[in-house]
Image (tube, rainbow, N blue to C red):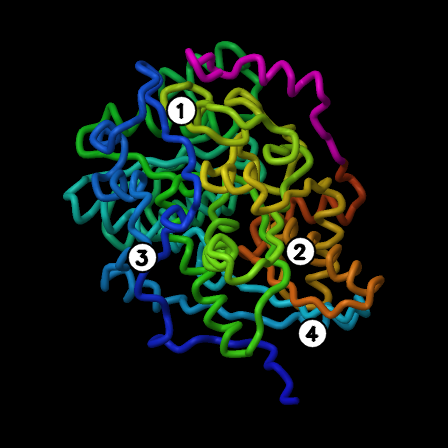
Amino acid sequence: MKKVPHKLYLTEDQMPKKWYNLRADMKEQPDPMLNPATFKPVKAEELYPVFCKKLAHQEMDSTTRYVDIPEEIQDFYKLYRPSPLIRAYHLEKYLDTPAKIYYKFEGNNTSGSHKLNSAIAQAYYAKEQGLTGLTTETGAGQWGTALAEACSFYNLPLTVYMVKVSYEQKPFRKSVMQTFGADIIPSPSPTTEIGKKILSKDPGTSGSLGCAISEAIEKAVTTEGCRYVLGSVLNQVLLHQSIIGLESKTAMEMLDEYPDIVIGCAGGGSNLGGLIAPFMQDKLLGRKNPRIIAVEPASCPSFTRGRYAYDFCDTGKVTPLAKMYTLGSGFIPSANHAGGLRYHGMSPILSKLYHDGYMEAMAVEQTKVFEAAHLFAKQETILPAPESAHAIKGAIDEALKCRKSGEAKTILFGLTGTGYFDMMAYSSYLEGKMNDIIPNDEELERSFEQLPKIPGIQ
């Protein structure tokens, strides 16, 4: 039998020309977003003050199975796509496992992550609409960097509210965003009314994505010609990120392979949703039955310890309400948490699939995550982003199960990007200074008590 190559790239002609909308094949749809003032389902036009019009329609579209990728976006994708599907031969050998391990590597662009797949799409639609600026939030910095790249390409001014703890821990992320012309503000900040309110209650807060989202939305809705864009969670983002899974499936078909297990890290859901999309389609339609595993941080465990409930997507409680697994919009992970994936909730699409039993979830302590990252870097020569290392940890665990059982399963995981801007966290791990701070049940219960009370629902 011919040996499978270490690395497989599709040709440009083989790249997907359409995004896949997973909702079109879901037997039960995610519950609709609700207007927080009326508790009625949100209509697309109600989103226009916040989102670009076409993105608002993508957000609401649950019937169109395949959405054409505009040619201009396809051309931009060709700057860094298709991304490689890589066989982890050296990791397999080290683990002494009969499992075959593949990973889809999304780090081959300046942002160092998969985030550019949606950033360029959102910037394109903003420019097409004639908007004159965008705002966003960023946690670990990948999304902010990706959107700065995309906005620079379209000459769109960008304001990024960066979670304060990341702003302080990752100065070079700021420098890259500034290189592309973005304005970076640590969040929460005194530049918005919501930021001032949060700071008055907790002056020493390290911030959260929920805080940064609130500030970015306030800036967008109070600035003429400006809109807000988000890098995860939303239906539109999972749509754009489906290119990851579509490329992966095509590449695996070329190798006459199909994954028994698909693993992705889980924060808000963009990478996970994109990677699993066509494999979940097979599962929903009864064609195949892969195990799909989400791996999240134990310090921000929305899937494994959260509530499936309607909640605000931001701390300032100005967004529509989404039915999702949530820790509460006021939840702030420990400042000690270094691995990204710090959002309080999870994609409504993925939340519904998890709730209905189509996928599994596991939570991992960050010291174990960095242990897996360290091992992977030594065996595969790529320094992974801490977010990606959650998926690596999941893949290693499954491969070791195969060693014990003797089963030669095929494992696919998403390597969302590189960790070159995360060296403070790596140093903390290597110097033995990293520890695990996990919320206790009492802390989570206090957060759950703040979930919105919706007449007739919760």
Q: Which residue is mark 2?
A: 392
Could you tell which of marks 1 and 4 lies nearer the N-terminus? 4
Mark 2 or mark 1, whichever is nearer to me = 1
What kind of element bears circle 3?
A: strand
Q: Dot 4 surroundings within 10 Å: few (below 14), some, or many (20 or more)?
A: some
Disc nearer the start of the sequence (2/1) = 1
The correct choice, above or below, for 56 with respect to 444 in the image is below
Residue, disc 3: 66
The question of residue 449 being in magenta is answered with: yes
Measuring from the top left, give residue 451's x and y in whole percent: 51, 16
Rounded to the nearest angstrom, the CA distance separating label 1 from label 4 is 45 Å
Residue 386, magenta (yes or no): no
Residue at which label 1 appears: 321
Residue 45 quadrant:
top left
Point 24% across, 23% down: residue: 222
Three-letter code for the amino acid on which mark 3 is drawn: Tyr
